[in-house]
Structures are given as structure tokens and as C-alpha cells.
Image: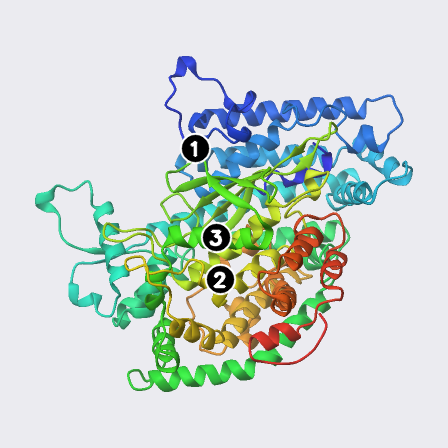
Amino acid sequence: MVFCSLNCIFARLKRSDVSMSEHKNPFFEPYGTPHDTVPFDRIRLEDYEEAFIEGIRRDNEYLEKTINNPEKPTFDNTILNPFDEGDGYYDLLDRVSTVFFNLLSAETNDEMDALAQKMQPILTKHANDMKLNPQLFERIKQVHLHHRRLTPEEQRLLDNCYEGFVRSGALLDETGKEKLRQLTEEASILSLQFSQNLLKENKAFTLEITDEAQLEGLPETALEAAALAWKEANSQQSTANSQKGWLFTLDMPSYSPFMTYSTQRELRKQLYMARNTVCTHDNNENNIKICQRLINLRREIAQLLGYKTYADYVLKHRMASNVRKVYRLLDDLITAYKPTAIKEREELKKIAKKEVEKIQPWDSGFYSHQLQMKKYNLDAEMLRPYFELSEVIKGVFGLANKLYGISFKENKDIPVYHSDVKAYEVFDKDGSYLAVFYADFHPRKGKQGGAWMTEYQGQWITKKGENIRPHVSVVMNLTKPTEEKPALLTLGEVETFLHEFGHSLHGMFANTRFESLSGTNVWWDFVELPSQFMENFAIEKEFLRTFAFHYQTREPLPDELIRRIIRSRNFMAATACLRQVSFGLLDMAYYTKKEEFTDDIIPFEKKAWKKAILGEQLPDTCMTVQFSHIMAGGYAAGYYSYKWAEVLDADAFSVFKRHGIFNQKTAQRFRDEILSKGGTEHPMTLYKNFKGSEPTIDALLKRNGIRKTKKI
């Protein structure tokens, strides 16, 4: 372990059936599993706390040995772990933290949540003890000033390590350090509480329907899923007392079809308001004050460290580099897309006018579907039968094989944390082992909404030259199978899978010496490039032809449907762009505050993103209190990254379009110059090494039917 990776342990339960008398804490010994994968089936709740405490003790022992080393500080005895890398001893804390915090998002329960609340302040204090230790920083500073000739990667590690300590308060006086401790510890607790509140609120709401007349318009897939959800929720009731019904939730596979197809406007309103008012109610899960405090805590941290705003602090290590450039991007997008978005809204109003006098937010999905049918004769349900999950998996894996020559083989001997999860071994084009890949597909009670990629083991190269390969995981909330049908996805869900798979390729292809520079350990407005790049394949005929077969007849997706998909690619694209821009504006509004934030969250939100909003804003709805990306997910002052990376992905994919979407030479260059390099060089350097030039916004505007050339 290198000290500069200690601040990353937060970025990342099953009870064992082994009897108490035989149980050993699995974190304290070699896992003894394929590729040393996490033995989820042997982990008990009590193992976590024991491993956390022992991990902290070992870290402190390591710290004492380092700062009391009588030898002159060098890169090798201070920045690098002076002990044998890969021995599993000093990385115990990272080992247990990775598993615990990953499962806290993917498979939590009340006991896990309680332990997280107990351990979070302890872990934050420990991280502060490391980062604010004056003797350790003095050694690091001496190495930074006086060191042997370093390789470019070693120099990058040293610079990151030194800068990481400085940005964590190492140059502050004792009063400042104590203040920083208080602020960071409070922020870590509130971020955790925010996430736990959001999960509880989202899972607490259900819309139960027992009158079949209220199901009008809903497709068969939605009805089957809702019937199964009702059955599962009422499984404890006796058969004699059971009633036929349908249950809808705020999980996207349930929520989205209801909002798109239901003719019951009042029920759409009920579901919409439930989703858009979570964590605003007068209960223990209200996030309003938590958000207010988090905004102020981050501002105070940044100002304590010498920055005007939290955005200034964050953007120092981003491609955008400063607030002005972020706003320029957002404003340029508004200028380019708003006229088209206004036309899109007028089209929506026109088609809705026959039924409603005034279009409301809970009407948008419903009438967008009608408009899409009118213009393109296409909707998600037409495509579902061709996107059966097991075939989509084959298609996505096949794409990786066509591009990079890698292959996937499911290994049921690799333990998983839930029956929904599949574990695969990944092999490189020469047949050598490359990585372990976990895929967690469906929503459930203890799982956060959304989709993300994470790791259970990073990649690095030991002193002995052993290349430790990564264990990566994608976690999603895709449509579940029902009693009648397998899991049939929408095209949007296929895109989600491709997006997260792009992140996983970034992790799987990692090939750097140091773990803290490998894989997705890059600047956050660059990290979305590999993921958003993969989404481009979703509408490519050559790709669709490899896996899109009707789950019953095995007929391929008809050419006519593919033509409609391509023709409808930019349907409501300007509206979607403004939606993303609005989130970026909201994020920047909070984190460019120089003075104490005292505004009421809800009205502030509506003012902050107003220039990107076309419809009327409802007074009671609130995005901020459920905006995990900027409150608890690491994207604070960085949500613009999605649009920034969209410019990059469109520009990069244009190279593939020019040479062929499956062109292996182009793909190998993308792998070698971007996917394998991690954070070993500046992102723009990596991009120019691949493309040969800096990106422009032209490819994105061309893709969306709006053309204009401008550098970002």
C-alpha cells in the first residue's frame, strides 16, 4: 500500500452458514478462492468490525515504522511500501473497506447500516491521522524535493501523493488541522446518512392496485412484473386471504413503464410525486438539512485549504481546470440545444393538447411515447422481445471480443454475494487470465437505485514483477424475469449495460505499476469517456445483428426496426441534453458559493437551473435531496463531467466510424493509449495519443443533429 491511496478506502454480507466454533475471520487469511476472490459466503457481520480495528492497528504500526526509519527519506522507503507488496498484511484495511462499502450499496441491511454509522467516524479519523501526521508529511516533502531519477509513472505517483497530502491539510497549522478533522468527520457521517435515508425512502413507497381498470395502457411485461412484485410482497398471507393485485415501486424497471404507458393520469401523478419528493417529508429520512450542511462543510473545507470555493478546490484536478470553463461548456450547450428543445416541447404540447389543457411533468413520458409512435412507430416494448438478458450478455461480451479479442467464461466456483450476481473469468486474446468480472443485474430491497461500476481488487505490479489482476463489478437495476418470461430489457437498459461495461473495461485492461494510478483512477471528467463511448454501439446495426434475436422465435431484429431505431436516435435529444445541463448548473450553483449557504434548498434549486428548464417547476418537488452524485457519490462540483465526457466519447467514436466500428487496430490503440494507462499521464495527453488531436464539440453536435465546431 502507498500512503496516498489511504483516502480512497471509502470509494468502495452475507452471514456464513459455518458454525461459530469453526469460524475464522476470512479477512485475516488467504481467501483460498479462485483468483483470491472475496469469499462472500464465509463473511459474517462481526468479521467486518474486527477486521476494521485490526486493519487500523496494522496501518498505525506501518506508520510508526515509516516515520521512525533512521534512513534518509527516499521514494522507495517512504512512498512505496517497504515490505513485500501483495503479502496481504498491510492492506487489510483496504481489503475489508472495499468489501464492506461495496456491499453497503449493493446488498445492505439494518445491521450493516448501523455498523457503517459506527465505523465511518472511526475510519475518517484514521484517514485524517495518516494525512495530517507531520512526521510522515515531512518525509514525503523531502522525497518530493530531493529524489532519485524517477520514471514518468513514479513521478506521477510522487506528485499525486504529495499533492494529496497538501489537499488533505498537511500544510495547515495545528488549529487548522483540528478544524479540518471536525469538518471531514462530520461530512463523512452526513454523506452516509444521506445515502441511507434515500435508500429507505425509495424502498418504502409502493403503489398497490387491485382494480384491473386502473391498469389500462400498461404493457404485458409491466403487468407481469407488478403481479410478481405483489405476490412476493404478500407471500406471508394465507391463500384464503390473498387478493389479486399489482405492485409498482420507484425502481426504474417498475416506475418507467408506468409513467410511459399508464392512461391513469392521477396514478401517474401519484407515482411521480412520490419519486420526486423522497427525503423531503417530515420524518427521519428528510435530507434537506443534511444537504444544506454538506454544502457548507465542503465550502468550509475548501476555504480552510486556501480556495475561494469548493468548485475551485475540485477543479484544480480536472480537465476543465476552472469554474469559467465549466460554465462555458454548459452555456454553449444551452445555446446550441435550447432552440431545438423548445421545438421538441411544442411538439409534445401539440400531441397532448387533445387530452389535457396543460402538460405536467407526469405527462411527459406518456405523451413522449405517443409522439415517438407517431413519428417513428417505435417504442421500448416493440424491442424488448429482442433484448433477452442472456443474449444481451452474449452480445456485450461478443463486442469486447470483436474489439479486443478478450473472452468471458462464467465460473460458478467464484463466490457471489447474491444469487442475482454472475461471476466470470476474463481471458485476454492470447488466452492468459485478465480479470474477474461480476455482474449484478436486478433491483432488490437492500440495493441502491441506479447503476455503477466498482472493484473488489485493483490492478498493480508487485516488486517481484507479478501483475495482480483486477476484480471488477457492475451493479445495475435492470428489468427482472417474471414467472412467464425471462428478463427482457429495453434499449435504454442495453445502453446502461454498455455504459457500465465500458467502465469495467477501463478496470479490466488496467496495466500500470501502481494501484492508485490504475484503471478508473483518473480525473473524474475523463472517467466517463470509456463508459459513454460504449453506448455508441447500442444503435449500430452490425452490433445488433450479433445478439438481438426474438426470445421465442429466434428471428433477428428486423431491418425495419433497426431503421426506426437509427431514425429516432435524436428523438427528444435536445430535451435530454438540457436535463443533464440543468443538473450541472445545480451542482455548480451549490459549490461555487463563497459565503455560508442559508437558502431554502427547494426554491434555490428551482432558481439555479432555471435557464435550462422549459416546463413549469412544481413547488414541492426536489432533486437535491436525492442527488446522490453530488451529495454522497463523489461528483460534487463535477456533474458537468458527463457532458464533458460526452464530447470526448462522440469525438472518439467518430474515429471508429471512420475506420469501422469493429476495427481492431483502432480498438487496440484505444486500449493501449486510454484504457490501459489509468492515471499515469494527463488525460488530454492520453486522448491526443489516441486521436492525434484535441477533441472538439463538432462530433457531438453532428451526432445530435446540431452542427457547430468548437474546442472544449
User: Judging from the image, what secondary structure is the residue with disc 2 in?
Assistant: helix
Residue farthest top in this picture: 21
- Residues at badges 1 and 3 in contact (C-beta under 8 Å)? no
- Say the numbered circle drawn on residue 451: 3
Left or right for 447, reference 230: right
Tag in front: 3 or 2: 2
Nearer-the-camera pick, 420 or 126: 420
Disc 1 designates what residue? Answer: 13
Disc 2 designates what residue? Answer: 543
Instruction: Let me know if residue 121 appears in the view.
Output: yes
Q: Residue 260 in the image: state x and y as whole percent.
A: 34, 69
Q: Residue 261 in the image: state x and y as whole percent.
A: 30, 69
Q: In the image, what residue type sits under mark 2?
A: Phe
Nearer-the-camera pick, 61 or 487: 487
Tag in front: 1 or 2: 2
Q: Is residue 182 above or below residue 388?
A: above
Question: Badge 1 local density, few (<14 within 10 Å), some, or many (20+)?
Answer: many
Q: In the image, what residue type sits under mark 1?
A: Leu
Residue farthest left in this picture: 240
Q: In the image, what residue type sits under mark 3?
A: Ala
Nearer-the-camera pick, 633 or 493: 493
Residue at image position (51%, 35%) is 100
Quadrant containing the N terminus in the rendered view? top right
Measure how far apart labels 1 and 2 are at the Cα level.
Answer: 37 Å
Q: Quadrant of residue 645?
A: bottom right
For marks 3 and 2 on the same chain, the one whose residue lies earlier in the sequence: 3
